[in-house]
Amino acid sequence: MTNTRGKRRGTRYMFSRPFRKHGPIPLSTYMRIYKKGDIVDIKGTGTIQKGMPHKCYHGKTGRVYNVTQHAVGIIVNKQVKGRILAKRINVRIEHVKHSKSRDSFLQRVKANESKKMEAKQKGSWVELKRQPAPPRDAHFVSTKKNRWENKMQSINEKVGSQSPWY
């Protein structure tokens, strides 16, 4: 084929609507409130072509820097060869949703603040850093009810009386 370099090239599944989710866009999409500084996920919706992000921004997360009647301006990081550029793009709100990436962090901050307050009242010190999961405790495995079995023996029986293939 000639000239297969269109801006929507390779987006057959990317911008398609999920199964049984075709039709009009729910009104809740338009009722969401976006403010400067909000973290949003960009996900192109194929049913609305106006204000659609380029395919390179699909699935990316950015920060809102401008809000208009029907669209938001977003700062998104884009890798261009060896460097990462902070790109400013304008996207309609049908192609944007609030990101949940910061929720767990804010929850942890709130929990840490309450731990600090309790420790201050008690006059003690509290560890706020997240720790990796420790190794499991040592234990014995009982062979009373589960008898050992020779795996190599069973492989040889399946093959027959031939020599193993390794």
Image (cartoon, rainbow, N blue to C red):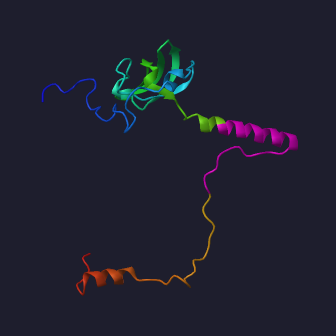
Residue 75 inside the magenta-drawn segment: no
Which residue occupies the extreme top position in the image? 69
Which residue occupies the extreme bottom position in the image? 161
Q: In the rendered view, tell whether residue 4 sits above or below residue 133.
A: above
Residues 59 and 24: in front is 24
The answer to whether one can see residue 153 in this image is: yes
Q: In the rendered view, tell whether residue 110 sits above or below residue 83.
A: below
Give the position of the N terminus as an image quadrant.
top left
Q: Position of residue 15 (x, y in %)?
A: 34, 31
- Res. 32 image quadrant: top right
The answer to whether one can see residue 62 in this image is: no
How many numbered discs, if any?
0
Residues 134 and 95: in front is 95
- Res. 89 image quadrant: top left
Residue visible at 60% across and 77% down?
140
- Res. 161 image quadrant: bottom left
**Left or right: 146 in relation to 154:** right
Q: In the rendered view, tell whether residue 2 sits above or below residue 122.
A: above
Q: Which contiguous range is marked in magenta?
A: 107-133
Residue visible at 66% across and 38% down?
107
Residue 122 inside the magenta-drawn segment: yes
Residue visible at 38% across and 27% down?
45
Q: Position of residue 112 (x, y in %)?
A: 72, 40
Residues 119 and 110: in front is 110
Q: Position of residue 49 (x, y in %)?
A: 34, 20
Which residue occupies the extreme left position in the image? 1
Residue visible at 83% across and 45% down?
124
Q: Position of residue 54 (x, y in %)?
A: 35, 24
